[in-house]
Structure formats: C-alpha cells, structure tokens
Amino acid sequence: MTVSIDEVSVENFHDFVRIYEGNSTTGKLLKSITSQVNHQVLNITTKTVLIVFLTDQSITDRGFHITVKARVVPDDPSMGYGTWTVIRIVGIILIILCLLIIYTRPWIQKRRDQNKTEQQPKPPQEEEPTNLFAD
C-alpha cells in the first residue's frame, strides 16, 4: 500500500496527523506530523492503515490531504517486479521443455527401433536351383 502525504498544514505542537500500521493506535506508528509537510510517500506492507487527526481546536490551518493506494507487493520486497517476470518466464520455458521431452520420447524410441530393424542384415534368400541340363 502506498500512502502519499500530499500536504499537511496544522498547528505546530498542538495538532497532529498520525499514521499507524494496522487498524488501531496500538499498531506501529509510521509517521507523526505536526506543522507543515509536503510530498512524502510511505510504502506500507500491511493490508490496513489508520490515519488519526488530533487537534486542540484553538487555531485553524489548511488541514491535510493524504492519498492511499493499494498495490500488489511481491512476497520478497527486495525482488522487483522484473525479477518475478523473469522467474515466471523461465518456469514456463521449463514446463514446455518437460512436455516436449515427455511427448517426443515415444516417437524418438519408435524411430530408433525402425532404424535398428532396417540396419539388421537380411538373411540370405534361397535361390531356386537352375537345371543346367534342361531339354
């Protein structure tokens, strides 16, 4: 999940925007913002995030604008999407090669058997005796 902090403009030390992992304030505090912040991005690996706004209501300011986007995260974040694509392609190629070996093996064996049969010497055929004293 990506949390884009587009703008936070709140009273310094009296108003806060806090971002927690999970769905309660007992989760890990990822960011606590007071005063002004612009254009920060947090990449979060949990499925839920909690955004809490705390104020003393004494002074007003612009407030905050935060965008949250869900995205697919690989099992191992250190491996990029390109690596997973290469792994998938190699896997598909290996499957195709295995299928080729499995399905062409009987055909290759049949061809070998035919070649062995053709290469075996043929037994000599008996010739009919010719009669040299024929009438």
Image (spheres, rainbow, N blue to C red):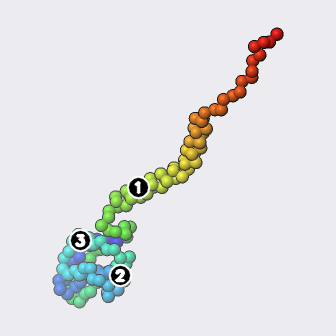
Q: If you read the primary sequence from the N terminus, does the residue marked by circle 2 or circle 3 appear first?
A: 2
Helix, strand or loop at mark 1: helix
Query: What residue is rendered at 45% in x and 55% in y?
Result: 94
- Quarter of the image with the N terminus is bottom left
**Label 2 sits on what residue type?**
Gly
Find residue 113 and report its image quarter.
top right
Mark 3 vs mark 1, foreground winner is 1
Query: Do callouts 1 and 2 mark residues in contact (Cβ within 8 Å)?
Result: no
Q: Amino acid at mark 1?
A: Val
Of all residues shown, which one is farthest toward the top?
135
Position of residue 120 relative to residue 41, above or below, is: above
Q: CA distance from mark 3 to mark 1?
A: 37 Å
Q: Quadrant of residue 133?
A: top right
Q: Which residue is mark 1?
A: 90
Q: Quadrant of residue 55?
A: bottom left
Instruction: From the image, tell me which residue sits under label 3.
Output: 40
Depth check: give the residue in front, 43 or 83: 83
Q: Quadrant of the C terminus?
A: top right
